[in-house]
Amino acid sequence: MTERDELLRRISIDPLVCGGQPCIRGTRIYIAIIVDALAEGLSPDEIISHYPQLSTDDIHAAQTYAAEM
């Protein structure tokens, strides 16, 4: 399994969670929230300080997912 595949396994799309919007598995944190925060100039550490349940790998997973879209 590639690193990309490992990162994308962190993403969950479930119609019963967050209305089917892609989020970090095990959380209700939308990928869009992470990508928007990065676009606004927040660093991964700043995002994690706002959402301590996230890890750096979760941030990378969100970026990888967004790149795939």
Image (cartoon, grey):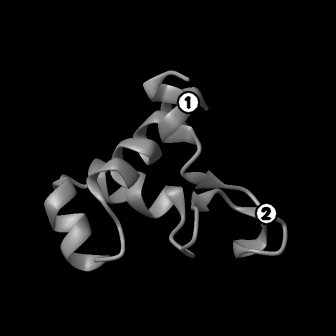
- Total numbered labels placed on residues in the image: 2
For this orientation, the residue located farthest to the front is: 1
Looking at the image, residue 39 sits to the left or right of residue 28; the answer is left
Q: Nearer the viewer, residue 23 or 7?
A: 7
**Residue 63 sits in which quadrant?**
top left
Does residue 42 appear anywhere in the picture? no
Which residue is pictured at 57% across the width and 28% down the height?
A: 68
Q: Quadrant of the N terminus?
A: top right
Q: Position of residue 12 (x, y in %)?
A: 66, 57
Q: Position of residue 41 (x, y in %)?
A: 18, 52
Q: Position of residue 30 (x, y in %)?
A: 54, 65
- The residue where tag 1 is placed is 5
Q: Secondary structure at mark 2?
A: loop
Q: CA distance from mark 1 to mark 2?
A: 18 Å
For this orientation, the residue located farthest to the right is: 15
Looking at the image, residue 67 sits to the left or right of residue 57; the answer is right
Q: Secondary structure at mark 1?
A: helix
Labels 1 and 2: the sequence-earlier one = 1
Residue kind at label 1, given as amino acid type: Asp
Residue kind at label 2, given as amino acid type: Asp
Looking at the image, residue 54 sits to the left or right of residue 3; the answer is left
**Disc number placed over residue 14 in the picture, else none:** 2
